Amino acid sequence: MNQPLSPQGDNEAAKKARNGRNIALALGLVAFVLLVFVVTLVRLGGNVAHPH
């Protein structure tokens, strides 16, 4: 964790790894938002189809 910073090689590798993690995190967040949206639509649609 406390390793000295190299001028170029490790910096590029770290940047690429960081970008990969950011993309994975963004895709996970989008998937979660879509899941919540679909579940909300299904629950609301169920209430509209069967009024009390």
Image (spheres, rainbow, N blue to C red):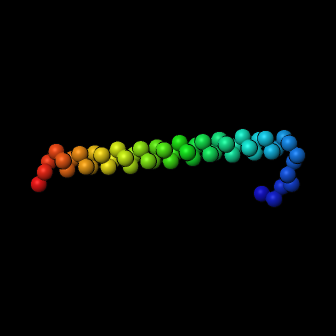
Residue 49 position within the rendered picture, expressed as x and y whole percent measured from the top left: 16, 45
Q: Where is 31 relative to 3, above or below?
A: above
The percent coordinates of residue 23 (x first, y second) are 60, 42
Quarter of the image containing the N terminus?
bottom right
Q: Residue at x 81, y 59 (%)?
A: 2
In the visual, does 14 lie left or right of 5?
left
Q: Position of residue 9 (x, y in %)?
A: 84, 41
* 1 or 12: nearer the viewer: 12
Could you say where residue 47 lies in the image, as x and y percent from the top left? 20, 50
- Specify the quadrant of the image occupied by residue 20: top right
* Identity of the residue furthest to the bottom in this view: 2
Residue at screen point 48% across, 44% down? 30
Left or right of residue 21, residue 11 in this image: right
Quarter holding the C terminus? Answer: bottom left
Task: Report the number of numbered marks.
Answer: 0
Could you say which is closer to the camera, residue 10 or residue 33? 33
Q: Residue at x 37, y 47 (%)?
A: 37
The residue sitting at 26% across, 49% down in the picture is: 43
Quadrant of the image occupied by residue 17: top right
Q: Which residue is situated farthest in the left direction here?
A: 52
